Image (spheres, rainbow, N blue to C red):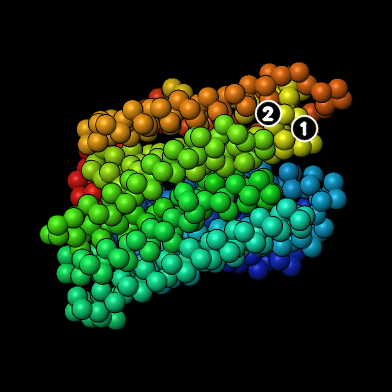
Amino acid sequence: MSAFWLTLLTPVIGAVVLAWIPRLQVSSWLNVGFCALEFLASVVMAYQIKQQGVYITPGFQIDAFNIYLIMLTAFVGLTTAIFSRPYMQDVCEQGRLTRSRMRLYHAMYQAFLFTMLLALSSDNLGILWVAVEGATLATVLLVSLYRTPESIEAAWKYFILCGVGIALALFGTVLVYFAAQHALPDPEQGLNWHTLYEHAQALNPTVMSIAFVFLLVGYGTKVGLVPMHFWLPDAHSEGPTPVSAVLSGLLLNVALYAVVRFKMLVDGALAGADTPDMAGHLMMGFGLLSFSIAVLSLQRQKDIKRLFSYSSIEHMGLMTFAFGMGGSLATFAGLLHMLVHSLTKSAIFVTVGHASHIANTQRIEHIRGLIRTQPGVGWGLLLGVAAIAGFPPFGLFSSEFLILSATIQSWPWLTLLLLTGLGIAFAGLFRNVHPMVYGTAPDGQAAVSANMLPVVLHLLLVLWLGLAIPAFLSGWLNDVTVLISGKGL
């Protein structure tokens, strides 16, 4: 599995090399090159896993669940790097960044990708925790890159809130290790996920229940679940636009992946207990709360990045709710929603970055007439919002329809709440986006140099997934569904 080591170690090499490259033109292209190598290696690894099955090596495990997210992470990392190359050069030419900070940006971009790939591929719960903490530290440096008072405040808020969250996750991990000491034939394997999964029914249900509360709150802080979400809108709005794209499209998935992995252990431990669905019910509760608060918060946003930050909280809440429901249909829907949301939201942040440059502001009331000033950016934003709002035939319509179908089957009285929330979210998004796209452009507003390739590519993929899920992908997602829920569609 040389492809695995190539995927994992390329960003490490990239971070070291890019930290020492002084020329911006060279470093920006190298950043794209390293990301391309990571993506190609992940594709080869995905093919090998499909042919050979699970790959386990000391400290790491690659199965259908994490290889799907590893390839998604590498792909979005590549397309965002392609967008980032000209965009960050323009930012540097405007005088907002020095060349030394651009070196920091490229190095931390690769370091950020490495921590996410490490978290996704690790079989050790301790390394998973370290990797998520490493992602926090890398992101703090990226969010504060502009060194404005607002960006530094956002970075500190992010660091403190996520630091508290990750400390709670550490305590939950310690409790899982404690439960393993009395259940595993070899207690030294108490942090290995696949060993714990094989002996999940022998784990103490009381200890595992308490552990999951801490783990859900801890990693849920990184997911952006309410009420631990306050860092997310600030971090998204004050950091560079490429950072917002990978934060919303990738990091939130990694944290939710960790929660789902722990839920699988807790479900096994509680299989014979009085409350076997405790973990799922907690996830449903936090997911619904996050979804409800986010759709209401969409109505009062004045900053375009904060608007779509709350949209991310809405969709992460919806995914958490779906995984909490469990069952084959809800799990499949949650996996599909994770995929199409990442593609769509990263595309939206690319258009938001260009829209902010055109208007020279992130204030929604000052962004007007995009479709007249620069039709590519205007149409990109309009179609991206249509996709994220769940319009057919985009992929989010399919995933949301499946989530609603699963809700009707299992919790029919919650269907009206979900439908109402989706309607309110639609109103909040289009009430703000319509004047930005079709309003009267201010005098002197001019087009900017825009790289819309990532937007076109992502939205075409989301459209394709809405029209017909290819057989290889549906089979892949079904394999993950079997792994998580125990049965497929």
Depth order, front residue of 481/407: 407
Estimate the x, y position of residue 224 in percent, counting from the top left.
49, 50
Residue density around tag 2, few if under 14, some if 14–19, many if 20 or more, within 10 Å: many
Q: Nearer the viewer, residue 164 or 385?
A: 164
Gap in angstroms between the C-alphas marked 1 and 2: 9 Å
Three-letter code for the amino acid on which mark 1 is drawn? Ile
Who's the residue at 20% across and 66% down the image? 205
Task: Determine if residue 471 is in view.
Answer: no
Q: Which mark is residue 358?
A: 1
Which quarter of the rendered picture does the N terminus lie within?
Answer: bottom left
User: Residue 409 location in percent, x, y?
Assistant: 22, 33
Q: Please, is residue 46 above or below residue 300 in the view?
A: below
Q: Which residue is mark 2?
A: 377
State the image coordinates of residue 477 (x, y, percent, origin top left).
32, 43
Q: Which image quadrant for residue 140? A: bottom right
Residue 119: quarter of image = bottom left
Secondary structure, mark 2, is helix
* Residue under the image location 71 percent in, 62 percent down: 104
Q: Is residue 418 left or right of residue 180?
A: right
Q: In this orientation, does residue 250 appear? A: yes
Mark 2: which amino acid?
A: Val
Q: Are marks 1 and 2 in contact (CB under 8 Å)?
A: yes
- Of the two numbered discs 1 and 2 in the rendering, the one whose residue sits closer to the viewer: 1
Give the numbered dot on residue 137. Answer: none
Considering only vertical position in the picture, is 322 above or below 53? above
Q: Of residues 235 and 214, which is closer to you in this image?
A: 214
Question: Which SS class for mark 1?
Answer: helix
Q: Residue at x 67, y 35 (%)?
A: 302
